[in-house]
Amino acid sequence: MDRITRPVPASSARAAFAFCASLACGAASANAINPEGVDPTLVQDERGMSPFSPTPSRNPRGFMYPSPYVPARWSAEFGVLGGSDAGPRIHNYGDYRDGFVLSHFGLSLQRSAYHFDFAAGAVGRRDQSYRASVGRYGVFRTSFFLDQTPTLFTDQARTVFQGTGSGNLTLVPGLAPGNNTPAQVAAALQSAPAFELGFKRTRAGIDLDITPRPEWRLFTAYNQDRKLGTRASGGASSYPPLPLTEPIEPIDYRTHNVTAGAQWSGETLQANLAYSGSFFRNAIDTLTWDNPLLVGDPAVTVRNRMDLYPDNDFHNVKLDLSAALPMRSRISGGVSVGRMMQDDKLPPPTANSGLAFGLYDLSQWNVPGALSQPTAGARIDTLLTHLSGGFSPLRDLSLRAKWRRYEEDNKTRYTAFNPLTGQQGYIGTDGGVPNVVPDNLYRAQIRAVAFACDKTSSGVEADYQVLRRTGVTLAYDNDSNECRNRERARTDEGRYRLALSNRDLAWATIRVSYEYAKRTGDEYNFNPNAAAYANSGFLNVPATLAQLRKYDLADRRQQVANARVNFALTADMDLALAAKYRSNDYGAAYGTLEERMQGFNVEWNWQPRPRASAYAYYGFERISNAMALINDDPAGYLSGDANAGGAVYPARNRWEEQSRDDAHLLGLGFSYGFGPATLDAGYSYMYSPYRTSYSFASPDAIVGGTLAAPGAGNSMPVINFRQQSLQSSLRYSVSRTVAVRLYYRYERVTFDDWHYDGLTPAFFDQAVFLGAGPRNYSVSLAGVLLQVSSK
Amino acid sequence: MFGRGSLRLFASLLLCGVLAPVALAEDGYVGEARCVACHSLEQEHWAHTVHARIFRSNPRNSLEARGCEACHGPGAKHLQDATDKSAIIAFTRRRDVPVEVQNAQCLQCHKGRARIFWQGSIHETSQLGCADCHNPMAKFSASGLLARASTSETCFTCHQQQRTEFRKRSHMPLLEGRVSCSDCHNPHGSVTRPLLKADSVNQVCYACHSEKRGPFIWEHAPVRKSCSECHLPHGSSHESLLAVARPFLCQQCHANVSHPAALLTRSNLARGAVPDERAVNRGCSNCHSQIHGSNHPAGARFQR
């Protein structure tokens, strides 16, 4: 059978060819036309798994196992792809371009206990991958891998800049930095060529895994993660509505990851010791761009400079232990010590010169001497300690307890101070905003705030077997968060969980659970970092709305219910149902008020023969959210009153918003083998409408006030996403070793998104965008592929 | 198919009947050759697996050298009465061997290492068997001896809702085969509730998004606390896996004076009466683009 058992099948597992000791280094070696990453030349054995089991055998939960494959020592698939004009998104994460494709090559050799395995996919394409592994079973193995993944945001971006991909964007000839009219910019964009925004990710690594004794394992690995390309960024020039620009951010990243460790798995004691390090390097430090539109003084606010992601280092050493004790008991614990740090050179506060606002000589702010410190000196240390244990005092009763504490120590310190002028603060947006004490109109942040949280979790749990195959679990957990420099110094969340697992029924497996959690905390301080700000020179403007509660710290009552039931309808047929409900009620008058999630899924599978199967599934998810806020009234600023209903946040400025995020997913497919031929087809349809509705007490609550109110309505247009795809394959075995595969894929994607609807790169006199929004597309792709193997 | 299968079944049973009376070892182990006499097709499939390659070419101990019986236990009783479900350790629903007994067989060799926290994990306490996700009897997946073709297909048998989420407008490239569930989660147990492979949510995300690790001189509180404060990990109806449409996502926390607290309506869209840059394109991120943290001395508001 061809490997198209799902229309867009799931990820590869071939990653394990290469040992993956660190996170995400293994991923997949799949590609666009072989998304499962399994050898596409494999066919399922028409004899099934066993002569003693003419119908599919089932796993302990009751799901059918598929029919096994008949592997080959070596295999390859290659051919030609051709199709209609593909839209840009079809290339996201994959490469469907027309032309020759070597979609798969695999080789597996063994002599005695020595083995060599090699696999390659989409050779020469943007989503190509390679895996090689050599070793002696039970003794050592060394592996190599290389993966590429393309990410394409759009191929229809337009810009007035030249120098895309570099750290220096200058306006095209004919435009003057910081001194053009919207019409001039619009004209330049009209004649600008479309270009791609996106990046390619390449990962390559090598590792060594040694097992000197069955209990011992020693390992080391290195991989490099490379990202190269561009994406849209954002650049304010001042407060709205002064114009902003969407510059093109260059991506030229390289991350080196290393890991090494030793593991012991004895009869009684098991231990894991590992070091991992990650070193991120950005080849481009800053991004500088000209102002396309007029911003203030054209002689001063000409250029902008952004500091791109700084180089950073990460180290972690981890030791985990687990020991078996008498009475079926076990104790586990561990410690993990980490450090994140970066010490990049800081750029001067502004890229411009001249006299800003007639007050500030930018030549005193555009040099390194204007900095309070030359480099960032940022560092966070982390410490994780944990201990857990369990024992069984009775045959049917198990008890467990656990404790875990994760600590962060943010040692980053920075004060915005200019030694040349003796002033605190900074020149914001390259001369567009003066956040300089004591001249600033609004509150100016002059000191960095080192956020960090310590999280302590503890819990007890009891399992009781009420029947032979039916267990009940009762658990209580408490999570406490102690966050520095946040609105609440501490929150505590107690969580009760009741779960039932039933496998006593021959024809079904039932799993249900219910959780109730309540989060409370100490006093909420809506302005916790006042000391990091300098008071306004003119006004006593409040920091924010006093009654707003940030949802990560607000009181919360949470309920979660889960149910999973799977039925063996007949000897060769399964039905699985899953449902989930979650509610979050926040103790807040403003901010996020509540959130709900409902999910329902059903899947049907039928395997009447080893080479015949069919499936259907439907998934539904709804996430709803409600919030409330009060718009501020500048006329009330003098009062300094931060309370709802006061002069700054009057009741007439109150507004509410609700969102409803639905998703419907339908999937249908089959595989049917007849004689030397196998036909596979899979279809999926995704529809996700996102609805936003709102209400407001008066026009003063909304942007545009009375001018905007008549057309404001009570909702945003619906954000729609529709995707349907059909993928099919007809494989015909010409001989035992040669087969031909005819491949066809159709995909159609449509978007409706009010963020981009009617949006042009020249956005009135307010902004110059790139036009990087989503685009509809449809594509038909067909291919003829030849398969050869050693079978 | 069923007809041919029945013939094979008959022939196999006949062969078994001939071989069964052979004398048995005292410890109950009968050796792989005896198993293969009846289970030749199973053996043919199993021969392609990494277990078979190791057990046959370089067994590390006497247990591995036992071949089939390393996992299924001594075969003597089974040989005497193949219909006795308790005579051998089997891993299918039909044979009804307790999951704890099944798992103990696997843990003979697979204890510790990535499974050091298996005991007490949510999958263990939910009575999952190793054989729920793995099938070492044949090659069903490219690696890992999974029960389905890939890691994610295996996970989706129970976690169906994640399949829906991975199909949303923005999503991790899981269905495209570029990442796998096990890149972020350790299904065999971890010290975090969602079975993460690292100490925290952020450490998991930094594995691919290392540029966002910082630390930065100007930090955004929820970013440092957890990426999941603003992003959905599997898929979202918005760009960049965001949980809620911008600007409302930001306004859930920001009512600061000067402009963040105002409601943007359809009048502020590109075709509205009062178009506003905050309602279109990437919303608040049009200006506050360095929202994950800034290293610029003038970046306190994440604009540089």
Image (tube, helix red, strand yellow):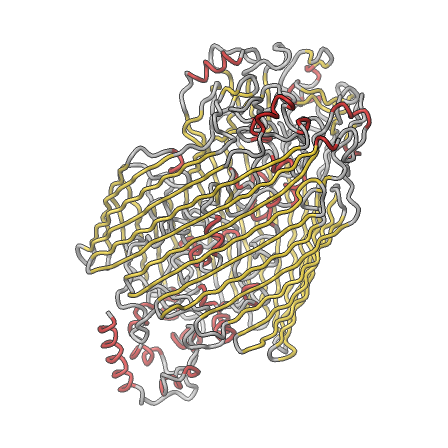
* Quadrant in the rendering for residue A327: bottom right
A720 relative to B281, above or below? below
A411 relative to B90, above or below? above
Q: How many marks?
A: 0
Q: Position of residue A181 (x, y in %)?
A: 54, 11
* Quadrant in the rendering for residue B189: bottom right
- Regarding residue A284, the answer to whether it shows in the image is yes
Report the front residue among A468 and A18. A468
Q: Position of residue B34 (x, y in %)?
A: 32, 81
* Quadrant in the rendering for residue A109: bottom left
Q: Position of residue A705 (x, y in %)?
A: 65, 24
Q: Position of residue B64 (x, y in %)?
A: 42, 73
Report the front residue among A22 and A708. A708
Report the front residue among A586 and A333. A586
B100 relative to A490, above or below? below
**Quarter containing the C terminus of chain A:** bottom left
Q: In the picture provided, is A645 more to the left or to the right than A316?
A: right
